[in-house]
Amino acid sequence: MSLPFEITDAPDEVNREMWSSFRAEKEKYVQAGPKKYLLCPKYRQQAAGIYNLELRPDDVWVVTFPRSGTTWTQEMVWLINNDCDFEKAKSIQFRKRFPFIDGSIITPDYYLEDIIKMNNMSKEEADALRCILDGEYKNVEKNASPRHIKTHLPFSLLPPKLLDTCKAIYVARNPKDVAVSCYYQNANFLPIGYVGDFEKYFDLFHRDLVLWAPYWSHVEEGWKMRNHPNVLFLFYEDMQKDLPSVIRRVAVFLKKTVNDEQMADLCNHLAIDNFRKNTSIVPNSRLKGVSDDTKPGFIRQGKSGGWKNEFSAELNAKADKWIKEHERYTDLRFQYEI
């Protein structure tokens, strides 16, 4: 299967810096496409399968840069598209309801085998986990319609007929909050294994040395497609300010209706304290070797403006300068507190 873009090994200086900051990966990172999106080595083996995925007209995709309210959006979208069937949502694993098509590129093979050993997995359990991480797109191909698919890949690395065939919801979040959330998640998730403080992390983030970066190229790709009839562009901050309004927009986009009772139930279901306790999304039992339990969990604060607790005055000035430099080339503007 062919690709219309190049995938190259990241330069040696990039790999040295990534290996010293993100301890799990030992092989060379790759850069994909003209924008040189930085991705895990396994992307090289799975890129064609993702790019050439056979699409279906009723597929619904959620596309985001990491830590932009992705999981929150996924649950909202799935429930709206399934007529707010909360019982059905509880009965099916979140990963199976809404697979992360490029999630299988993250965990290095050697680290996967370590996880299998740490958890004393049976042959059946180990084979099932290997099957997932061998390429989630293979499982997506088998899923019944309507499929719901999550990705952190930008539109340029996704199937070329995606927007002419399916519906896609792109969610963008301001870069300061994204950087903070990525920092905590990259430190918590051991197959990425970030080592260092936030100041160092932001330096990497703004130099495009984190996974799925460049951030600005990613969100600008989404922004440029905002007027396409099969794209709904959302801001995470708007979801925070007025969730019912966003739910109505998503329902119209998906050609669904949400009555007043469903709206109240859905808003309650998505409230951050309830969302964090939802075991269908965040299971009580976790595999050893996946998360660092001494650090904040996957669903952290779920709010906007938390960046103010992490940025020093000096670092904030650096971030503002970086943001203004990029705003020269786009009319995309973010809200930094609500």
Image (spheres, rainbow, N blue to C red):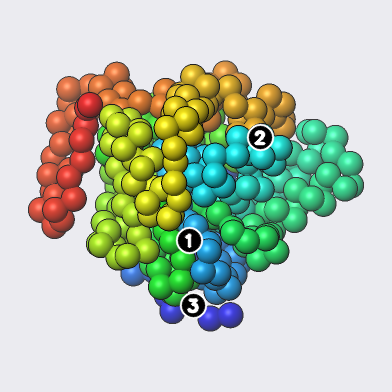
Q: Which residue is mark 3?
A: 3
* Front label number (3 vs 1): 3
- Mark 3, Cα crowd under 10 Å, few <14 / some 14-19 / many 20+, is some
Q: CA distance from mark 3 to mark 1?
A: 15 Å
Q: Give the quarter of the image for residue 94.
A: top right
Residue shown at the point (48%, 40%) measured from the top left:
76
- Mark 1, Cα crowd under 10 Å, few <14 / some 14-19 / many 20+, is many
Residue 37 image position (x, y, % from top left): 39, 59
From the viewer's perspective, is residue 293 above or below residue 133?
Answer: above
**Depth check, front residue: 75 or 318:** 75
> Can residue 42 be seen in this snapshot?
no
Whichever of callouts 2 and 1 sits on the residue coming sooner in the sequence is 1
Whichever of callouts 3 and 2 sits on the residue coming sooner in the sequence is 3
- Mark 2, Cα crowd under 10 Å, few <14 / some 14-19 / many 20+, is few
Residue shown at the point (31%, 52%) measured from the top left:
233
Question: Helix, strand or loop at disc 1?
Answer: strand
Q: Give the quarter of the image for residue 196.
A: top left
From the viewer's perspective, is residue 121 above or below residue 229?
Answer: above
Residue 162 image position (x, y, % from top left): 45, 69
Residue shown at the point (42%, 32%) measured from the top left:
260
Q: Which residue is mark 2?
A: 87
**Depth check, front residue: 60 or 39:** 60
Q: CA distance from mark 3 to mark 2?
A: 41 Å
Whichever of callouts 3 and 1 sits on the residue coming sooner in the sequence is 3
Pointer 3 with pointer 2, Cβ within 8 A: no
Residue 30 circle label: 1
